[in-house]
Image (spheres, rainbow, N blue to C red):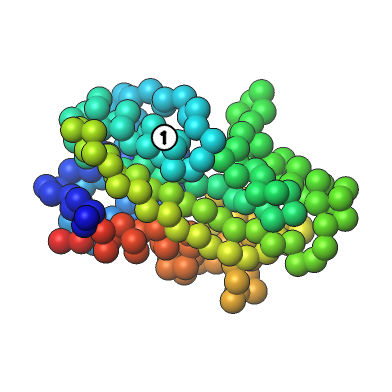
Amino acid sequence: MSPRRLEGTDLVLASHNAGKLREIRALVQPFGFTVRSAAEFGLTEPAETEDSFAGNARIKAHHAASATGLPALSDDSGIEVEALGGAPGVYTADWAETADGRDFALAMETVWSRLETMDAPQPRRARFVCTLCVAWPDGHDEIYRGEAPGHLVWPPRGTHGFGYDPMFVPDGETRTFGEMDPAHKHAISHRADAFAQLVAGSLGR
């Protein structure tokens, strides 16, 4: 069965993450969609209770679609470190949580410290994963998963991007995501991979 295609021009981004909103708006804009964030509708963030990217993406997209009556797009993404058995994975953001908010510098240090403690071999393989979910108010959804394989470096490098970008070098590159021009990162990232599938499936006009 072919994926359902989006109609109209309005799309809700089921996220309060400013970095994701910026990247997704840039990727969706060429297709004529007006993207509004969940925050613009005053939506709360639902509890992400699943143990998979797809499960949490579905929770967020269906929450926004039901509340707004519009198709909603969610993005659940994170980094999986091979030597850590795929951690932090769906808990990528949780590793950055502190009493004063998210601290990704601390999260990156935690990842590297654990790899050092276990004397993980080089190169320290990892991959960014992005799972997109498009949900409609009638309960239908479509899932698209993208990946960007690479390895980790220390110390972190670069001031672009967000999250764990400064410690991740994608395959075929010498710069971290944090060192790359955003346009170049957008072209090769896990999110770009997932969006290419989204375009072929639900987004194409």
Q: Does residue 116 appear in the picture of this structure?
A: yes
Quadrant including the N terminus = bottom left
Is 202 left or right of 132, judged from the image as shown? left
Label 1 element class: loop
- Give the number of callouts: 1
Is 71 left or right of 23, judged from the image as shown? left
The extreme front residue here reads 1
Mark 1 residue type? His
Question: Crowdedness of circle 1 by 10 Å Cα count: few (<14), some, many (20+)?
Answer: some
User: At 38% from the left edge and 33% from the top edge, which residue is drawn?
Assistant: 60
Vertical position of residue 196 compared to residue 132: above or below:
below
Is 154 left or right of 165, judged from the image as shown? right
User: At 38% from the left edge and 23% from the top edge, which residue is drawn?
Assistant: 44
Quadrant including the C terminus = bottom left
The extreme left residue here reads 8
Q: Does residue 157 appear in the picture of this structure?
A: no
Residue 190 in picture, x, y percent from top left: 48, 59
Q: Nearer the viewer, residue 1 or 166?
A: 1
Residue 23 in picture, x, y percent from top left: 40, 53
Image quarter of residue 90: top right
Residue annotated with mark 1: 16
Residue 107 in picture, x, y percent from top left: 69, 42
User: At 60% from the left edge and 71% from the top edge, which residue is drawn?
Assistant: 171
User: At 88% from the left edge and 48% from the top edge, which residue is drawn?
Assistant: 117
Residue 10 in picture, x, y percent from top left: 18, 43
Vertical position of residue 96 compared to residue 173: above or below:
above
